Amino acid sequence: MSLNNQARQSLLYGTVLLALAVLIGAFGAHGLKNLVEAEKLATFETGVRYHFYHGFGLILLGLFAQLFPNVKAQLSHWAFVVGILLFSFNCYFYVLSGMKVFAMIVPVGGLLFVLGWGAFALAIHKSKN
């Protein structure tokens, strides 16, 4: 059985983003430990944690898309991807640069995470038919 396009896209993005999360997390744990204060390191770790959560969310979305190919879940896919970029990557940039403008974008990514999970719930609801 081959993967449908929606499943393939979510699984591919999820696995690539999870690999990045491992690399970035390792950099934070080993490279930043002695370079930034504990509060900023906690912010970096929060970015990594949500990066992981939503990378796994993409994997779940890909599996769902394979099981229910007629239910469209692209909104969830893009909300998770863009949410990771706006939430997690702006946590990383803020810690590395100290520029508050990056920290101010983080809540937009959080809202996209909520939108993505809500859209995923709606797609699951629609799959009952």
Image: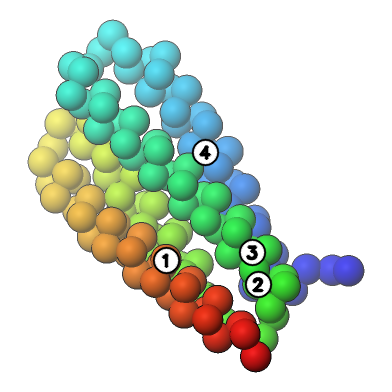
> What x and y, as percent, mark residue 53?
46, 47
- Element class at badge 4: helix
Residue 117 circle label: 1
Quarter occupied by the C terminus: bottom right
110 relative to 73 in the view: left or right = left
Q: Mark 4 sits on what residue?
A: 20
Q: Nearer the viewer, mark 1 or mark 3?
A: 1
Q: Residues within 10 Å of mark 3 (few under 14, many from 20)?
A: many
In which quadrant of the rendered view does residue 39 lie?
A: top left
44 relative to 97 in the view: left or right = right
Residue 40 circle label: none
Q: Quick check: 111 above or below 84? A: below
The amino acid marked with disc number 3 is: Gly
Residue located at (72% from left, 71% from top): 66
Q: Quick check: 101 above or below 119? A: above
Q: Residues within 10 Å of mark 1 (few under 14, many from 20)?
A: some
